[in-house]
Amino acid sequence: MVQLPIYLDNHATTRCDPRVLQAMLPYFTEKYGNASSINHIFGTEAHEAVEQARRQVAALIGAAENEIIFTSGATESNNLALKGVARMYRHKGNHIITVATEHKAVLDPCKRLAHDGYEVTVLAVDELGVVDPQCVAEAIRPQTILVSVMLANNEIGTIQPLAEIGRICREKGVLLHTDAAQAVGKIPVNVDELQVDLLSLSGHKIYGPKGIGALFVRKRDRRVRLEPQIDGGGQESGLRSGTLAVPLIVGLGAACQLCRELMPQEALRVKQLRDRLWQGIREGLDGVRLNGHPVQRLPNNLNVSFAGVKGEALLLAMKDVAISTGSACTTARLGPSHVLKAIGLDDELADASVRFGLGRFNTEEEIEWVIGQVIDTVRRLRRYATVWELRPSNATV
Ligand SMILES: Cc1ncc(COP(=O)(O)O)c(C=O)c1O
C-alpha cells in the first residue's frame, strides 16, 4: 500500500535527508561556536566543520576549496555573481548575455542591472529549450563582460550545451556564470570541463537544508573578482559578510558528500522511474506532449502538456500527488510560464502543463499509483469539459 500524499515536486525543494539532519544536529546544540571566533575550542570546531563542508562542496563540482563562498541559496549566489561581476568589471564593459528560460533569480538581477545602465541581451532558445552556442558567440561584443546560462532548467529539465559555451567564452575572454541549482547532485558537474568561472548551487535542491547555498568563484587558473553585495565582518574572503550559518553549512557539505556517493545509482534509478511514468501516461492517454529535450534533460524531470485540461485543475483534482504547474519560485506571478512560452507553447497549451519532479525517496509503487491517478483524472476532466461544451445552454453563455 503506498503512503499518501506522494511528493513529486523535487524541483521546488527536496526532503532533507535524515543523514544530513544527523550531521547538522550537534552544531545546534553542543557545537554552537562562531566559526570566526577561533580563540577557543567552540570556535575552532565550528571553523573546522565549515572548512570540511567547503571541501565537500568543492569535491562535488571539481573545484578547489578556496573557490567556494557560502551564501543563503542559489538566489543570493546568482545575485552575487551577476551584480558582483557587473560592478567589478564596469570599467571593461557594460554588456551581459543571458537566456530567456533562465530562472527569475537570474532574469530579475539582469533587469535591475539594465535599469542601472547595463545592456542585457536575452537569447532565445529552440523548441526543446536549448540555446545555440553559435548564438552566444554572435552576441558577444567588445563590451561583453559576462555570459550567464543555466546548466539545467527547473521547469522542463533541458540541459544546455554549457561546455561548448564555456569554450566560446574562454576564447573570447568573457566570464561565464551558470545557475546549476537544478543540475548539481543530479548529473555530474565539473567546473573545469564546463569551463565556467562562476557556478551557483543550493542546499535544499539536493536533500540538504533550506537557506544555504554556495557560489563557486574561479581562482586557480584565472582569478575572478567580484564586488561584494553584503559588507560587514569580512567573512568568506570579504565577499559575503555575516556570521556563518554553521549547522546549515555542515548540512550542505553532508548533502554534497551523499550526492557524490549516491549519484551514479540514484540518477539511473530516478531516470528509470521517470521513464516509466512517461511511458505509463503516454500509453493511457492521447493528447499528451513532452516539454523540453527528450534526451538532454535532467533524469528527474518530466514536464507534460495534457491537451484540453488545465494544469491547475489537474493539480486540484489530484490532492494526493504533490506536483506543480511550473516554478515554485514564480508562482506569485500570474500568467503562463515564461519557459513554456519561450519554447513556443501557446497560452492554452502552457496552461495545460504540469511538472513532475522525481527524487531520492520516490518508489516504484508510488509511480505506478501516480500513473493510474493521472490517467483517471485527465480522462474525468476531459469528460467534464466535453459535457460542458455539448450542453445546449452553453451556446448562449
Ligand atoms: C534554477 C534555479 N535557480 C535558482 C533557484 C533559487 O534557489 P534558492 O531557493 O536556493 O534561492 C531555483 C529554485 O527554484 C532554481 O530552480
Image: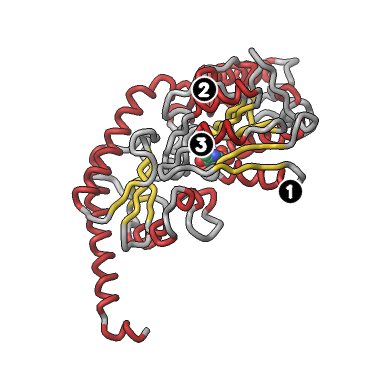
User: Earlier along the polypeptide chain: callout 1 or callout 3?
Assistant: 1
Identify the residue position indicated by label 1 in the image: 115
Tell whether label 3 touches label 1 (CB within 8 Å): no
Q: CA distance from mark 2 to mark 1?
A: 30 Å
Identify the residue position indicated by label 2 in the image: 194
- Is 294 on the left or on the right of 110, as rendered? left
Instruction: Check disc 3 and give the amino acid type.
Output: His
From the top left corner, tell me how far across and down residue 332 is, in percent.
Answer: 55, 56
- Quadrant location of ligand 1? top right
Kindly tell me whether residue 202 is visible in this rendering: no
The quarter of the rendered structure image containing the N terminus is top left
Q: CA distance from mark 3 to mark 2?
A: 23 Å
Element carrying mark 1 = helix
Task: Establish whether ligand 1 lies closer than 8 Å to the Cβ of label 3.
Answer: yes
- Is 214 on the left or on the right of 158, as rendered? right
For residue 355, above or below residue 274: below
Q: Nearer the viewer, mark 3 or mark 2?
A: 2
Q: Report the front residue among 91 and 57.
A: 91
Residue at 47% across / 53% down in the picture? 341
